[in-house]
Amino acid sequence: MSFFSFGQSAEIDVVLNDAETRKKVEHKTEDGKKDKYFLFYDGETVSGKVNVTLKNPGKRLEHHGIKIEFVGQIELYYDRGNHHEFVSLVKDLARPGEITQSQTFDFEFTHVEKPYESYTGQNVKLRYFLRATVIRRLNDITKEMDIVVHTLSTYPELNSSIKMEVGIEDCLHIEFEYNKSKYHLKDVIVGKIYFLLVRIKIKHMEIDIIKRETTGTGPSVYHENDTIAKYEIMDGAPVRGESIPIRLFLAGYDLTPTMRDINKKFSVRYYLNLVLIDEEERRYFKQQEITLWRKGDVVRKSMSHQAAIASQRFEGSAASEMNAPKCISDIPHLMNAFLTLF
């Protein structure tokens, strides 16, 4: 691992003990690019070495202590001055004194709780990092190293299908069904759409996957919608009695698990958005929330027993699910509800 220079007196380097064998994954940075970081799970031990290298051997370095921290924090982009730390662990590596030659200090954070998944969004960032510090009278010497955390889940057997009826009275009646309401990130959305009544000239239909990021509380709530995927169901006019199958593979898209009320700071939810466009370019749509989760049936051999148990925990129980916003009124029994037109 390369060194990064801080000031004129010394350089700090943080090296993980299992750096050669630990898996790396791509993670989006704040500027939208992707870099690779070491991957950890909840409950895993984080250990390694802090190397303090004197730039001028033989010249002593006075300090007020050397420490390393493991930090989990949330940063809201509209409130950059405040970092909300939900994990903060500190290990003292050396008492105040002086260094006359380059030294290496071992550290270990055992079975570290990492309750949330790493996330970089449009208005918020959740990150985990190690920060080594040589405390000095004027300017501290500091080095940070980010890691990525994935939260694993094993969902219960109950995973009901989604069935809905939508329509415009005496003009359009559609039934659509998805095979389940909860999908892991490599899953396949399977469904079918039935046209029971068609008196509108529909020329195009698609399903979108929409990510909705919500940050803040009260009057300072921000919503950001991002269309992750567009899946064309048909191009042309359907006829009464026609049915169209749907098969949408999620593995090819940049998705995260559903996150609900993370540390009371933000949420990330996903919706299937059914869109119909008629020959006059009018758009009709219906949204349904789905739950995404990271499959946890394969647990890394290096994970501790605590981590294996933690992998069974899903971030936000199904009981806390909110009803999806309804952009088209549901049809109760008769078609007396209308598609929202925009």
Image (cartoon, grey):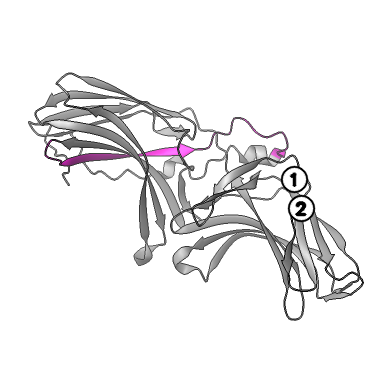
**SS category of the residue bearing label 1:** loop
For the magenta stretch, what is the residue range? 279-305
93 and 102: which is toward the camera: 102
Give the number of marks. Answer: 2
Quick check: is 160 in the magenta stretch? no
**How crowded is the residue under tag 1: few (<14 C-alpha within 10 Å), some, or many (20+)?**
few
The x and y percentages for residue 70 are: 68, 58
Which residue is painted at 91% across and 71% down in the image? 100
**How crowded is the residue under tag 2: few (<14 C-alpha within 10 Å), some, or many (20+)?**
some
| Residue 9 drawn above or below residue 236 | below
Which residue is painted at 45% across and 38% down in the image? 253
The answer to whether residue 149 is left or right of residue 237 is right
Give the labeled residue for mark 1.
Answer: 19
Which residue is painted at 10% across and 31% down in the image? 200
| Residue 280 drawn above or below residue 212 | above
Quick check: is 286 in the magenta stretch? yes
The x and y percentages for residue 170 are: 7, 31
Q: Do the residues labelled 1 and 2 touch (CB within 8 Å)?
A: yes
Q: Can residue 109 be seen in this view?
A: no
74 and 110: which is toward the camera: 74
Distance Cα–Cα, label 1 vs label 2: 7 Å
Give the labeled residue for mark 2.
Answer: 15
The x and y percentages for residue 124 are: 47, 58
The answer to whether residue 34 is left or right of residue 288 is right
Q: Is residue 327 visible?
A: yes
The x and y percentages for residue 301 are: 71, 33
| Residue 285 drawn above or below residue 266 | above
Which residue is painted at 39% across and 33% down in the image? 181
86 and 268: which is toward the camera: 268
Amino acid type, residue under disc 2 in the picture? Val
Amino acid type, residue under disc 1 in the picture? Ala
**SS category of the residue bearing label 2:** strand
